[in-house]
């Protein structure tokens, strides 16, 4: 039987990580999440495109950092549920010695951590920190036990900062983490914007279900997260337009999800 310290998994309230898993074609969700996910699609049909394209952006960004920038350490904050081509799989395919630290505070993600760790390569490391990104100091303290903070680190916030309690909190979280990593480190970040009224309405409806609120923000606010960093070409763009595969050129269209990859000098 589970002990008193076992994480509580709520199956009566939808959860964004599980809904995202549903939209991406995963299997780790409950009926309440499917219902909330389908209701969201009714309001914003493009949300499934955003889910799929966000993973494509992650794949391209991690390949770029591991393959072209020589990054061998990744701190993926707010990772969500594992689906396919996760950060460690992409990075370790390029360089098997890569170390990846995932951070999340969702109980269901925690229950999947052991399965995730079995994918560690013989030369690399894949591990998980149970922490809330509103406490970046704790994340840094725990990550230092695994990653070398004297060497560059790829810091990732992939579509999760809309859950920040305030915009000031959002900036504090990212800047606290980026201040802790050395020169040559990178920030990979995207979030949804408030350009699309249907998406804004979808997020408001989700809040009404009892799920943790998610707030899409103006493009300018998201771009400001990269202030003081050197953006990699093509800069701050819709994630579909960040170095799309040659086969996609001419077929991609912007969506209301914007981000960038940027280097700390």
Image: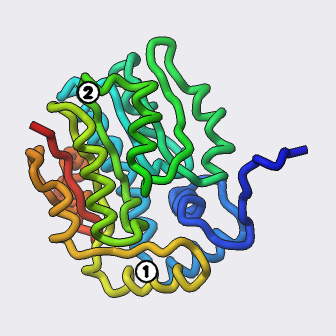
Q: Is residue 58 above or below residue 91?
A: below
Question: Which quadrant holds residue 252?
Answer: bottom left
Q: Residue at left 28%, top 68%?
A: 168
Split into 4 quadrants, where in the image is the N terminus? top right
Q: Relative to the observer, which residue lies in front, 173 or 68?
A: 173
Question: Which quadrant holds residue 100?
Answer: top left
Dot placed on the residue nearer the N-terminal end, 2 or 1: 1
Q: Residue at left 23%, top 57%?
A: 259
Residue 12 coordinates in the image, percent (x, y): 73, 72
Residue 201 coordinates in the image, percent (x, y): 42, 87
Q: Is residue 200 above or below residue 248?
A: below
Q: Is residue 194 above or below residue 129?
A: below
Helix, strand or loop at mark 1? loop
Answer few, some or many: residues within 10 Å of disc 2's Cα (few below 14, many 20 plus, some between 14 and 19).
many
Q: Is residue 121 left or right of residue 265?
A: right
Split into 4 quadrants, where in the image is the C terminus? top left
The residue that disc 2 covers is 71
Q: Relative to the observer, which residue lies in front, 248 or 166?
A: 166
Count of residue discs: 2
The residue that disc 1 covers is 44
Q: Is residue 102 left or right of residue 161?
A: right
Residue 155 coordinates in the image, percent (x, y): 31, 41
């Amino acid at each position: 039987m589970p002990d008193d310290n076992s994480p509580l998994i709520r199956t009566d309230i939808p959860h964004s990580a599980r809904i995202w898993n549903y939209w991406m074609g995963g299997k780790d969700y409950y009926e309440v999440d499917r219902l909330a996910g389908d209701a969201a699609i009714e309001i914003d049909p493009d949300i499934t495109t955003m889910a799929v394209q966000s993973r494509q952006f992650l794949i391209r960004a991690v390949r770029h950092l591991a393959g072209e920038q020589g990054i061998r350490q990744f701190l993926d904050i707010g990772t969500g549920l594992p689906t396919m081509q996760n950060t460690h799989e992409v990075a370790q395919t390029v360089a098997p010695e890569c170390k990846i630290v995932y951070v999340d505070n969702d109980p269901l993600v925690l229950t999947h951590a052991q399965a995730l760790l079995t994918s560690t390569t013989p030369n690399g490391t894949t591990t998980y920190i149970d922490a809330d990104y509103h406490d970046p100091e704790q994340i840094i303290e725990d990550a230092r036990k695994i990653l070398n903070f004297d060497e560059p680190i790829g810091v990732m916030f992939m579509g999760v900062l809309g859950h920040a309690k305030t915009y000031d909190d959002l900036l504090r979280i990212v800047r606290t983490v980026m201040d802790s990593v050395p020169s040559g480190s990178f920030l990979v970040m995207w979030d949804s914007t408030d350009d699309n009224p249907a998406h804004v309405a979808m997020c408001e409806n989700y809040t009404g279900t009892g799920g943790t609120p998610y707030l899409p923000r103006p493009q300018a606010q998201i771009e400001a997260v990269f202030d003081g960093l050197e953006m990699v070409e093509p800069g701050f763009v819709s994630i579909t337009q960040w170095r799309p595969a040659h086969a996609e050129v001419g077929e991609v269209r912007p969506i209301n999800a914007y981000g960038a990859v940027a280097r700390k000098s």
